[in-house]
Image (cartoon, grey):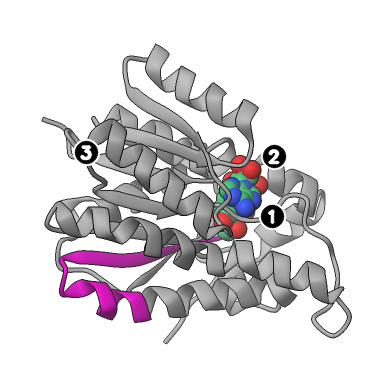
Amino acid sequence: MSRFTGKVVVVTGAAQGIGEAYAKALASEGATVVVADLNVDGGERVAKEIEAGGGSALFVRCDVSSHDSATALAATVEAAYGGIDALVNNAAIYGDMQFDLLISVDWDYYRKFMSVNMDGALVMTRALYPSMQKRGGGSIVNQSSTAAYLYSGFYGLAKVGINGLTQQLAHELGGMGIRVNAIAPGPTDTEATRTQAGDAAKDLVKGLALKRMGQVDDMVGACLFLLSDDSSWITGQILAVDGGQTFRL
Ligand SMILES: NC(=O)c1ccc[n+]([C@@H]2O[C@H](COP(=O)([O-])OP(=O)(O)OC[C@H]3O[C@@H](n4cnc5c(N)ncnc54)[C@H](O)[C@@H]3O)[C@@H](O)[C@H]2O)c1
């Protein structure tokens, strides 16, 4: 038996990058994975690759900023598999995000950004927690970032929100046996980071204790640990997976 045999896990933003790595790793440990993303081509590709490798996966198009979309996803998954055991709130506007300051960013863009990067985790949690409650409990992992601890404008502000949401929801859902934790990755080598940071990534690496970029597989161990029963008495925690980029006392 693998750690996730018989478990149904929804991973948002799983059409590429870190979310894709989470989805594939979960499937390889026996989970039925729901690939939830706005990107239809990428999401279908990931689900097909999981199935071709002998795993079980379903792509569901989903906009994490939309209550209707999140509720529809919950209904689709319930109908297909009878319930949900875990959720990874990984989706975010990242690779193609606008560069601007908090004091000047276009207000409509700011609100759209926060509705995805911060509120999206709450929208998805609100839609999916009843399915976990019915199963007797579950685990949620929110994707934060070390940007929450560094100057990084509205991107970092959204991740501060993710951290706060993680701590507050841990209390609201703990009585139902649902744990809520977060991972704060440091700079990780994805297509989105290459687009967004370019050569600046090389400078970031100089500031890390471990002198290399993170790889998507570096995130997988922490995510699966927090989703699994190996962490059954851990909730409300934010685990930095960052090569020593940050420390908090
Ligand atoms: N790559 C890094 O260096 C790094 C570091 C720290 C944190 N993170 C976080 O990790 C996560 C994944 O990062 P990545 O590098 O793989 O990014 P990515 O841009 O490759 O992946 C993000 C995914 O989210 C999807 N998405 C965007 N808006 C959506 C919406 N409204 N509804 C559903 N899906 C939506 C995109 O289609 C994409 O598939 C993000 O939350 C990011 O903030 C990344």
Crowding around mark 1 (Cα neighbors within 10 Å: few <14, some 14 to 19, many 20+) is some
Q: The magenta stretch spans which residues?
A: 168-187
- Which secondary structure lies at badge 3? loop
Of 84 and 19, nearer the camera is 84
Residue 149: x and y in percent read 58, 78
Q: Is residue 45 left or right of residue 9?
A: right
- Cα–Cα span, label 1 and label 2: 10 Å
- Callout 2: helix, strand or loop? helix
User: What is the number of the mark on residue 191?
Assistant: 2
| 81 relative position to 1: left or right | right
What residue appears at the point 37 percent right and 47 percent down from the top-left corner? 74
Estimate the x, y position of residue 209 in percent, counting from the top left.
Answer: 54, 64
Label 1 vs label 2, nearer the camera: 1
Answer with the quarter of the image where residue 175 lies: bottom left
Could you say which is closer to the camera, residue 60 or residue 41? Answer: 60
Q: Position of residue 213 (x, y in %)?
A: 61, 49
Of mark 3 and mark 2, the one earlier in the sequence is: 3
Question: Which part of the image, by quadrant, shows the N terminus?
Answer: top left
Q: Decide if residue 62 is in sight here.
A: yes
Q: Nearer the viewer, residue 109 or 231?
A: 109
Which circle, 3 or 1, is nearer the viewer?
Answer: 3
* Disc 2 CB within 8 Å of nearest ligand 1 atom: yes
SS type, badge 1: loop
Q: Which residue is mark 1?
A: 94
Q: Are marks 3 and 1 in contact (CB under 8 Å)?
A: no
Q: Which mark is residue 82?
A: 3
Q: Looking at numbered disc 2 in the image, what kind of residue is underneath it?
A: Glu
Spatial CA distance of label 3 from label 2 is 35 Å
Q: Is mark 1 within 8 Å of ligand 1?
A: yes
Q: Which residue corresponds to the image point at 61% horizontal and 61% vertical from the top-left? A: 116
Q: Is residue 235 magenta?
A: no
Q: Amino acid at mark 3?
A: Gly
